[in-house]
């Protein structure tokens, strides 16, 4: 009873501490996101002055096409996938109670990438109807993420509950196996398909259109809404899973459902953009350090900060060496790898490991 009371008091204390400044923080991040969107719309090989276009409505047909048919869906997609990957990382870190957990660590991203790469290889030798080609790669990625998640749950689940450590270790093994098989596919395909898979596996938003944007929107928005609805059980589980059970939380159901939602979001993001690494790892930690650890503020700030980070990274990727384009995964990895090492060192010092 004392432990249950202490857990409840901890959550209430965190809510009280972070209640102040919640709305201004969200408004500030929304303003930053809007500013980033305007910068991204203006940046590119072809200069399009969006302020002039808004003021006078004058734009050539070429500028109109570039703005509305190329840049706008691409920028919206960067924000959408950045938000989706970031919230997935925050949820996984809460479920696993591990600061190093993210969609890539449990093998979901790499498995989705493996099946999407296999689909691209198949499309290089098999001609499908145009409509089928549109959905074939995303569907393949979702199948890959689903199969890896089923395997992951079979390994980590037991009669005593889901072992978080086994979950992470199994995810690391699945991730390594999937990347090995993806490398094998890259070895056997022709040069054109190899370039396509290689560039795609490092992350790229080139070729994004409103169709892919609309397909991605549904799972990301619904998934974010679901995670917001279960933020209180997730918060209890992140503090102490046993105490969450004592307070009536069905921890097994929350874990399973959350993992399935994460798989759906990651699969649809990876299928259109490739692997955009470290977003799910870095963003929740930055938001936790800046705004607080309670999921009431961590989830929305992770969504907004993830959208900002990926939109900025994509803007750099397509403007640093115009007219060429850098894979966005390289940009995010430049930020993510040092931060990942910092987290490892911090955890080592925290627990006095030698």
Image (cartoon, helix red, strand yellow):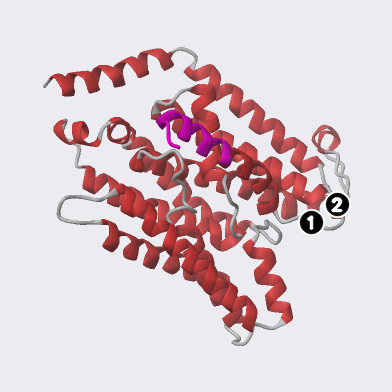
Percent of width and height locating residue 341: 57, 41
Residue 252 vs 212, above or below: the answer is above
Percent of width and height locating residue 247: 16, 30
Marks 2 and 1: in contact by CB < 8 Å?
yes
**Magenta segment includes 156:** no
Q: CA distance from mark 1 to mark 2?
A: 7 Å
Report the span colored magenta: 341-354
Residue found at x 52% / y 29%: 287
Residue 187 vs 277, above or below: the answer is below
**Magenta segment includes 342:** yes
**Can you say which quadrant of the picture contains the N terminus?**
top left
**Can you say which quadrant of the picture contains the C terminus?**
top left
In the figure, residue 148 lies in which quadrant? bottom left
Residue found at x 68% / y 58%: 204
**Mark 1, other Cα within 10 Å: few <14 / some 14–19 / many ≥20:** some
Residue found at x 28% / y 35%: 237
**Residue 130 visible in the displayed image:** no
Badge 2 marks a residue whose secondary structure is loop
Badge 1 marks a residue whose secondary structure is loop
Chief secondary structure of the magenta portion: helix
**Mark 2, other Cα within 10 Å: few <14 / some 14–19 / many ≥20:** few
In the image, 148 versus 272, the foreground residue is: 148
> Which label was assigned to residue 325?
1
Q: Which residue is mark 2?
A: 321
């Amino acid at each position: 009873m004392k432990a249950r009371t202490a857990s409840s008091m901890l959550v209430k204390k965190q809510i009280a501490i972070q209640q102040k400044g919640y709305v201004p923080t969200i408004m500030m991040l929304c303003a930053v996101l809007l500013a980033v969107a305007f910068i991204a719309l203006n940046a590119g090989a072809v200069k399009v002055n969006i302020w002039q276009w808004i003021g006078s409505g004058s734009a050539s047909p070429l500028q109109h096409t570039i703005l509305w048919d190329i840049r706008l869906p691409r920028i919206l997609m960067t924000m959408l996938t950045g938000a989706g990957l970031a919230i997935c990382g925050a949820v996984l870190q809460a479920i696993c109670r591990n600061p190093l957990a993210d969609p890539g660590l449990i093998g979901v991203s790499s498995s989705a990438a493996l099946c999407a790469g296999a689909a691209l290889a198949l499309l290089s030798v098999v001609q499908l109807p145009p409509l089928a080609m549109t959905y074939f790669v995303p569907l393949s990625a979702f199948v890959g993420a689903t199969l890896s998640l089923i395997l992951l749950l079979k390994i980590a689940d037991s009669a005593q509950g889901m072992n978080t450590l086994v979950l992470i270790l199994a995810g690391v093994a699945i991730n390594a196996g999937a990347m090995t098989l993806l490398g094998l596919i890259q070895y056997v395909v022709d040069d054109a398909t190899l370039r396509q898979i290689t560039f795609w596996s490092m992350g790229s938003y080139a070729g994004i259109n409103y169709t892919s944007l609309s397909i991605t929107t549904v799972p990301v928005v619904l998934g974010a809404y679901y995670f917001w609805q279960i933020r209180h059980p997730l918060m209890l589980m992140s503090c102490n899973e046993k105490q969450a059970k004592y307070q009536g939380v069905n921890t097994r159901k929350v874990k399973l459902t959350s993992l399935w939602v994460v798989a759906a979001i990651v699969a649809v993001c990876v299928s259109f953009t490739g692997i955009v690494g470290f977003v799910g790892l870095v963003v929740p930690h930055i938001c936790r350090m800046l705004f607080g650890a309670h999921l009431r503020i961590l989830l929305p700030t992770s969504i907004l900060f993830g959208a900002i980070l990926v939109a900025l990274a994509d803007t750099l990727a397509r403007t640093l060496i115009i007219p060429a384009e850098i894979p966005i995964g390289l940009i995010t990895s430049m930020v993510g790898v040092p931060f990942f090492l910092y987290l490892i060192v911090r955890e080592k010092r925290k627990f006095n490991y030698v």
